[in-house]
Image: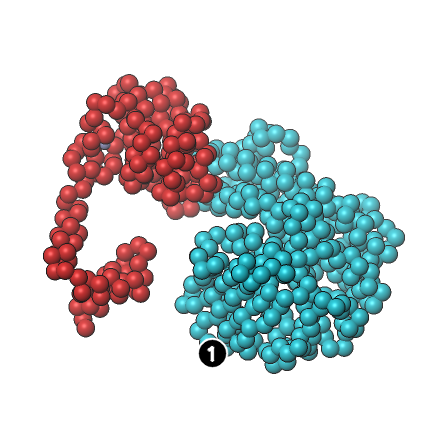
Amino acid sequence: MPFSSIRYAAFRNLVDAELDLAAERVFFVGENGQGKTNLLEALYYLAYGVSFRGQVDAEAVKRGAAEFSLSGRCSEALSDSPILSEEVFVSWAERVKTIKVQGKPVRDRKILVEKNPTIVFCHEDYSFAAGEPERRRFFFDQAAGLISLSYIDTLREYKRILRQRNAALREGRFDLLDLLDQQYVGRGIELMAARRRLQREFDDRFVLRFEAVSLLGREVRLRYRPSWSGEEGIAEILAKLAAKRSEETALGTSLSGPHRDRWSFAVGAENFAATASTGQLRLVSLTLRLVQAEYFTEMTGRLPLLLFDDVLLELDRSKRRRFLELIPPAGQAFFTFLPGEPWEEYRTDSTLVYEASDGRFAN
Amino acid sequence: MKALEEFVSLLTRLPGIGRKSALRVAYHLLRTDRAFAQALAERIAGLQDAIVFCSICGSYTETDPCPVCSSPARDRSVICAVEQPQDVVTIEGSREYRGLYHVLGGLISPLDGVGPEDLKIQSLIARIREGGVAEVVVATNPTVEGDTTALYLKRLLEATGVSVTRLATGMPVGGDLEYADRLTLARSFRGRTKL
Ligand SMILES: [Zn+2]
């Protein structure tokens, strides 16, 4: 749901203020370190209850302050009367984070995710293309979770079972391992099925969009290789786990399962990441986000909020133009730009532009 | 004010009570009717003497055995296994269930170092061996640990010949038995499934 305004207090280097955001596109223009990205992070906090930089909440408190608070007003459409808008509130004080919607405490962050589905395009996404397998699993789990809250439940349960199973392996609780394996495989194959579906849905879209911007002339495809790939049914996976039990007990950890699934990008039989340039890998991560946004809308019929943190800078002028044309419809989009970028070219009549300086925003 | 400080610091050791609400309670008690404060103090002091664990099923009771265990009107062929004594109170509130109970006193969780040997499972088997029990309904919460415990009981109890069922998943996933409303609980009991 689009934000019509945001208010922040003691959040990073931002000077306490309330900003009007009632526009389809909002640009924050300024040099580095002036607060542009921090403002995007504040919006992300209101959408997910956490930082997109993967940092702990304490880091987001302004130096010298003890607590921060954020509050945003959002509604289904920007044209809605303010009476129909809802207030989302996030604060962190005395090591306790409080999340409220319309004054009522929210116990589970996933409620927030459903209210304000948000997709952020940022530098850190580069690791989806070039980083550890864990980073790609993170991306696809987030993409699946944004569409289905039950995927988030299944993933949480799987992770909990995994921890119980690892504890049982370490303690040598053979009497419990059979039971835990049943739960483990049950949730595991649910995750695998959802990930297989995601791969099918993402693959063609990804190929088309990546080519449309990169003009590489070769098909870059998305691959998914589940950890339990050779086995068909529950019984076969259980048998495999039983066969590996002594090895797992010796190491005290679970050696197979969806937490070891692999996602990769391939050109023919080759791993694309091994030969791709930095620019191409950046484009891979941006394209993943584009597909995520588009697929989200297709599956849910809703428009996400999009946050673009300096990412256009990573593309040359012609790629930038082609990329902008591919941005799917959004409930609202926020961009950060350096003063030297041709942001004037991208603005429309309904664009709100703020200049950032020293944690203050002026339009 | 030492007396106030001590009282507040004791109150904050109770679940769900922070310093702010403890202070509110303290100031309220200072203003309130003396007889009320006296009655409250007596109830607090006497609570652990008045309420004991039932020696058969392990639930809270004022008389041992508890009214459920000693009632001739209850269906003695069904035992409902729950995690903690307060779950019995919750399920009784639904008025859907007419059988007996058995409090396990926890859930299997290797992470917390809790194994089946830490739960009251042997006494459950002893009750089944006495005869007359046809079904055990496992009413643990639908969490990972609740599932593990249910699976464990199913495997163990199958050998005794009783049928082992689980509450139907009318309850929200990850939802607590304690917070389930009466209607949902009643539906869960009617729709229980064989494990
Ligand atoms: Zn009893």
Image-based side of B54 in relation to A44, left or right: left
* Rendered residue at 52%/46% (across/down): A156
Residue A286: percent from left, percent from top: 73, 58
- Picture layout, residue A66 above or below residue B164: below
Q: Is residue B105 visible?
A: no
The image quarter in which residue A258 lies: top right
* For residue A314, side relative to residue B156 (left or right): right
- Splitting the image into 4 quarters, where does residue B74 fall? top left
Q: Quadrant of the N terminus of chain A?
A: bottom right
Q: Give chain B's shade.
A: red
Mark 1 is surrounded, within 10 Å at the Cα level, by few (under 14), some (14 to 19) or many (20 or more) other residues, namely few
Q: Residue at x 29, y 31 (%)?
A: B101
Q: Residue furthest bottom?
A: A358
Specify whether B160 is left or right of A237: left
The residue at the point 18 percent across, 65 percent down is B31
**Residue B122 versus residue B22: which sits nearer the camera?**
B22
The shade of chain A is cyan
Residue matched to label 1 = A64
Residue found at the very far right of the displayed protein: A217
**Viewer-nearest residue: B36 or B80:** B36
User: Residue A204 placed where, x, y %?
Assistant: 78, 45
Protein chain holding label 1: A
Image x and y of residue A16, in percent: 53, 76
Counting from the top left corner in percent of width and height, residue A25 is at 69, 65
Q: On the rendering, which quadrant does ligand 1 occupy?
A: top left
* Amino acid residing under circle 1: Gly
- The quadrant the C terminus of chain A occupies is bottom right
Q: Secondary structure at mark 1?
A: loop
